[in-house]
Structure formats: structure tokens, C-alpha cells
Amino acid sequence: MKRRILLADDELTILLTLKAILEMNGFEVETAASAREAEDKLRTRTFDMVITDMWMETETAGLEVIRAARSQPYNPATAVLTAYPNLGMAARRNGGADTLLVKPTNTGDLLRQIEALLVTHADHKAGVEPEPEEEEVVPKAPHVSRTANRTAKTIPRPA
């Protein structure tokens, strides 16, 4: 069964490009060109994930979409898509988005982030506790694999 994503963005080029990429990678994607359209679809359909641009009709339109998604009984994973990471981080804190997707990004990174969020969110919904984090010796790098990050943590510090 394909996982369903609602993609909300007022930029048609981004909307259609991301839709095509996600569909080519096995997702079922519905689109919304405004916060209002996204909110309507959230009420009448179910989604595994909602990805919304931060700024659409207004500078808080993305927050409205996240809040609408959070209010649904099926509890989809949520991500804010933005070209402005600082504003997106505020949206994540204030709006309750699960993650932040910064555009532009390459396709591989985007797909890995989406897959990771879907797995983490499904675990959370099922009551599975995340592994406790060990003290980081080397900060995690987003482009480094989880194994490499864990390996880096075990490297002894020089005396």
C-alpha cells in the first residue's frame, strides 16, 4: 500500500516537481496550492504525511496547515518546507511540525528525510521509545550515515 502525502505549496513549479519526484519513488501524492485547500483535504481524506511550504497566501499559512494536520484524528507526520531555515525553525517550535525540509535540496536527501520522518512518526504512534542518545564526541553531520555518526561517537577523545 502506497503511503499518502499531502503536499501544499503555492509555487506551481515546486508543487509539480516534488509531486513527480515523490510519485516516482512510490508515494501517493495529493497537492494543494493554498492553506485553505490543504485544510479542506485534511478534513476529507487521510494522509500519512503533510509537507507544507511556510509562506503561501500569508506568512503563517504553513503554520495553519500544520495545526490543521495536528488536529486530525489520524495524526499525520508533518514537515515544513522552506527556503528560510530560521523562520522554519520558529514554525517547527511554534506550530508543532515534526521536521524542517530546507529547499532547495537534492532528491536523495529529501527522500531520506521523508522516509526517516515516516518511520520515526510511525514508531511514536505505536509507542516505541527512541534509542537514548549517547554523548556526542563528533557532531552529527546530515550527509553522513547513521552508522558513521554512531561510529564517530565511539572514537576516543585525545588526552
Image (cartoon, rainbow, N blue to C red):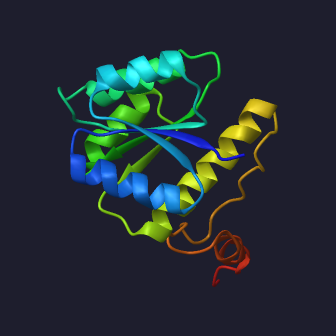
Give left or right: position of 126 versus 133. right
Q: Is residue 125 left or right of residue 5?
A: right
Determine the image quadrant of residue 9.
top left
Residue at the left extreme, as displayed: 58
User: Residue at coordinates 49% horizontally, 70% vertically from top-left?
Assistant: 108
Residue 46 in the image: x percent, y percent? 59, 26
Asked where in the image residue 65 lies, by quadrant, the reply is top left
Residue 64 in the image: above or below residue 98: above
Q: Nearer the viewer, residue 147 or 37?
A: 37
- Counting from the top left corner in percent of width and height, residue 97 is at 47, 33
Which residue is pictured at 57% across the width and 51% down the height?
27
For the point 70% across and 70% down, the residue is 150
Q: Residue at x 76, y 40 (%)?
A: 123
Horizontal and vertical percent position of residue 70: 52, 21
Residue 49 in view in this figure: yes
Q: Is residue 32 left or right of residue 27?
A: left
The quarter of the image holding the C terminus is bottom right
Residue 145 in the image: x percent, y percent? 62, 73
